[in-house]
Amino acid sequence: RGIHVTHFGTGCIYSYDDEHAIGSGKGFTEEDEPNFKGSFYSFSKALTEPLFACYPNVLILRLRMPILYDLNPRSLVTKLLSYDKVVNIPNSMSVLPSLLPVAIEMTQRELKGMYNFTNPGTCSHNELLAMYKEIVDPDYEWKNFSLEEQAQVIKAPRSNNELDTTKLEKAVADTKIPEIHDALRVAFEHMAEAKKTAHNADS
């Protein structure tokens, strides 16, 4: 019936390669073919995404490593804090509170097609955790390990990539989408304020 549909998908269908090297600043665009099949999740998403794209009334928004303003169990921050060690690789990420208003705008305008839906730029896990330590918890410490060491303790390989957000930024040119480090700082400031409020309530 032509009803507009917004589908939240994933950008975890790519992995850094020679053409899109770590630190090159060249991200994967919406037109690039998926190149990551290391997990069943990513493999199945890469297969089903084109099926959604066949429909002319569908808006597909590709999220990556979603982050909230609290320590929700599904948030990337919460997951990283729970690990004994983390790999230090830059990635595209989606700070949801800064992006969901954009999704609403795109839906109201009935935009269609596929969009990488992350904050512009990349952030490494060490950068993220250092900012968390600076703003939220000065006592927090973490350790790194290599991809090879990580592979020994996880069930399936992880997608690491940078997504190009040029198409998204052009589509909502009148709306400023914060760069990932700026968006993270706002998120951690919210966490710090919530932590302070909870502490005062317990005092």
Image (spheres, rainbow, N blue to C red):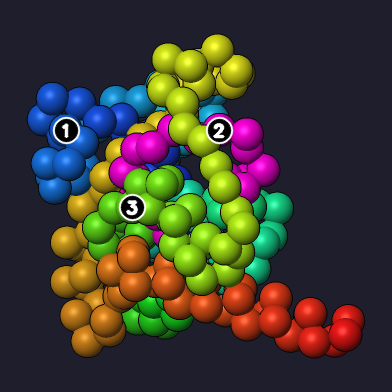
Q: Quick one: which residue is furthest to the right in this view? A: 202
Q: Nearer the viewer, residue 194 or 116?
A: 194
One can see residue 81 in this view? yes
Residue 54 percent location from the top left of the image: 35, 46
Badge nearest the viewer, 1 or 3: 3
In whole angstroms, how far apart are the C-alphas of marks 1 and 2? Answer: 24 Å
Q: Amino acid at mark 3?
A: Cys
Indicate the secondary structure of the residue bearing disc 2.
strand
Q: Which residue is mark 3?
A: 123
The numbered mark at residue 109 is none
Residue at image location 67% in from the left, 43% down from the top:
82
Q: Which residue is mark 1?
A: 21
Q: Amino acid at mark 1?
A: Ala
Indicate the secondary structure of the residue bearing disc 1.
loop
Residue at image location 21% in from the left, 36% down from the top:
22
Dot 2: few (<14), some (14–19), or many (≥20) neighbours within 10 Å?
A: some
Residue 83 percent location from the top left of the image: 63, 37
**Above or below: residue 50 compared with residue 157:** below
Badge nearest the viewer, 3 or 2: 2
Image position of 192 (left or right of 145): right
The numbered mark at residue 85 is 2
Image position of 154 (left or right of 100): right
